[in-house]
Amino acid sequence: MTIAVRVIACLDVSAGRVVKGVNFLDLRDAGDPVELARKYYEQGADEITFLDVTATVDERATMYDVVRATAEQVFIPLTVGGGVRTADDVARLQAHGADKIGVNSAAIARPELLSEIADRFGAQALVLSLDVKRSGGRFVVTTHGGRTETDLDALEWAREAIERGAGELLVNSIDADGTKRGFDLELITAMREISSVPVIASGGAGALGHFAPAIAAGADAVLAASVFHNGELTVGEIKHALHESGMIVR
């Protein structure tokens, strides 16, 4: 059975507003998260990913009220990440309407968290969020919204996370983020080679021609943010371009 390619709209949120920058820096306001989520849902998005990009930095919990308001208006899977540190955080987010939970910094600090979440809620509810950059000729993981570089090899970490129960990899290229020069195809290919779970390509989307190559490189889904927020592309246009490239879309 051939699985349809997913197109995911991402909402990076800080202080209750959607923000967007370049390489995770110089964040600027892009609108209300609930309104934007509803807009992309109506355009045909397959999923919404909601990331509280400063939750870990500010040491505060994800904004549950915004999650709930979004879930009440969006009837497609909603992934929420940012500030998730315990399995109880996952339970609270699911109670507010999240379907899947993205975990990054807290899992790097304590890898057992992945097993705890997967054992309690199932692998289908657990997304490992990887903010990856090139360093010293290899791919390494960053934390705290891309601000802190680790010496953790991104491919090795992804492999370990899958073994611990991660059901999906959200692979975001810090180098490509916000540049609109296209996805990091080398990174996607490398992740596909080691991953037994779906891979979501994130970071760098800027034109209709950028999406099909990401799928061809091994992504199961493509995620974009600024091209939607700025009104440059719609979900429907991306799906049409993927269909024209011979790919199955919903």
Image (cartoon, grey):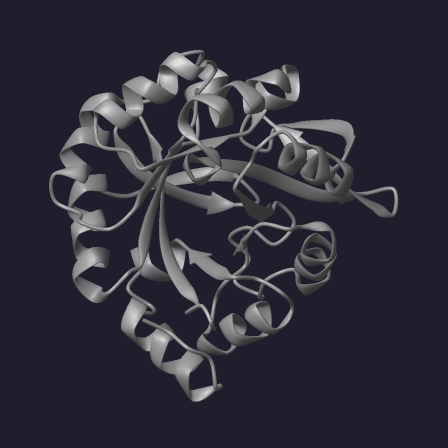
Q: Position of residue 103 (x, y in %)?
A: 50, 29
Q: Position of residue 224 (x, y in %)?
A: 42, 57
Determine whether 93 is above or below 219 in the image.
Answer: above
Q: Residue furthest right?
A: 136
Answer whether residue 40 is visible to the viewer in this image: yes
What residue appears at the point 16 percent right and 61 percent down from the top-left corner?
42
What residue appears at the point 49 percent right and 23 percent down from the top-left corner?
119
State the quadrant of the C terminus.
Answer: bottom left
Write down the quadrant of residue 130 in the picture: top right
Q: Position of residue 85 (x, y in %)?
A: 48, 15
Q: Position of residue 57 (x, y in %)?
A: 49, 18
Q: Is residue 66 left or right of residue 6?
A: left
The one nearer the camera, 119 or 201, is: 119
Tally of numbered tags: 0
Determine whether 171 is above or below 123 in the image.
Answer: below
Q: Residue furthest front?
A: 1
Determine whether 4 is above or below 24 in the image.
Answer: below
Q: Is residue 122 left or right of residue 134?
A: left
The one nearer the camera, 239 or 227, is: 239
Determine whether 205 is above or below 64 in the image.
Answer: below
The one nearer the camera, 59 or 41, is: 41
Write down the quadrant of residue 32 in the picture: top left
The one nearer the camera, 189 or 227, is: 189
What residue appears at the point 53 percent right and 72 percent down from the top-left corner?
210
